[in-house]
Image (cartoon, rainbow, N blue to C red):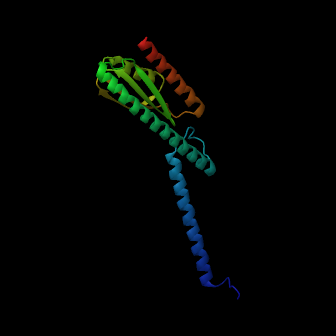
Amino acid sequence: MEINSNNPNNFSSRTDRKLIERNRRNQMKALYSELNSLVPHYNSRESISLPDQLGEAANYIKRLQTNLERMKQRKDSLISGGQSMNIASSRTGFSPKVPQIQIHEMGSSLVIGLTTDTHSRFIFNDTIRILHEEGADIVNASFSVVGNTAFHTIHLTVGELTPDYHGVAVTRIAERLNKFIYDAHA
């Protein structure tokens, strides 16, 4: 059987396949673009290739999974440690008075947990001041009080920086806050 390239049905079929393939490519392009928009970029001025975008997205998802596992473990240890602390506190009337700080890096963001007694009013204010001095943008700050203990949570970004400078800024913030808390306790 001979295929006639002038056959109108053959032309229509070829056009349909081209249209279907073009629609598929457009849909994939839109999905790649959406995925890329969900991943934080340290250097957004530079255009990166599609394989690099996919690799960056995969690495970002792996970091999120690792952070989630670490936070789950931290939560479990705090819950189990907190229960024994509450039992001891209720028996002795003693609650921890030493300010404590925890700094967690999540991509280009930081989450700071600050634990103080309710009478240490200025530690939170000074922490915010230090963060502003370091150029951090505070996204959200909240607190809760349980007994004589205040739990502060601060969400912040260090700005749109290159990965190298971001690490330096995070390290400098961590060092200043840890020194401040140590000096406040001393």
Q: Is residue 159 above or below residue 63?
A: above
Left or right, 168 with respect to 186, comes to right
- Residue 165, position as x, y percentages in the image: 58, 29
Q: Is residue 40 visible?
A: no
Which quadrant of the figure contains the N terminus?
bottom right
Residue 103: x %, y % from top left: 47, 28
Report x, y in % for residue 77.
43, 32
96 vs 17: above or below: above
Of the 4 image quadrants, the one containing the C terminus is top left
At 42% from the left edge and 35% from the top edge, which residue is drawn? 76
- Asked whether 160 or 35 is in front, the reply is 35
Q: Who is closer to the viewer here, 165 or 82? A: 82
Please indicate, yes or no, whether residue 10 appears anywhere in the rendered image. Answer: yes
Query: Hey, which quadrant is residue 131 in on the image?
Result: top left
The answer to which of 100 and 110 lies nearer the viewer is: 100
Horizontal side, residue 3 vs residue 167: left or right: right
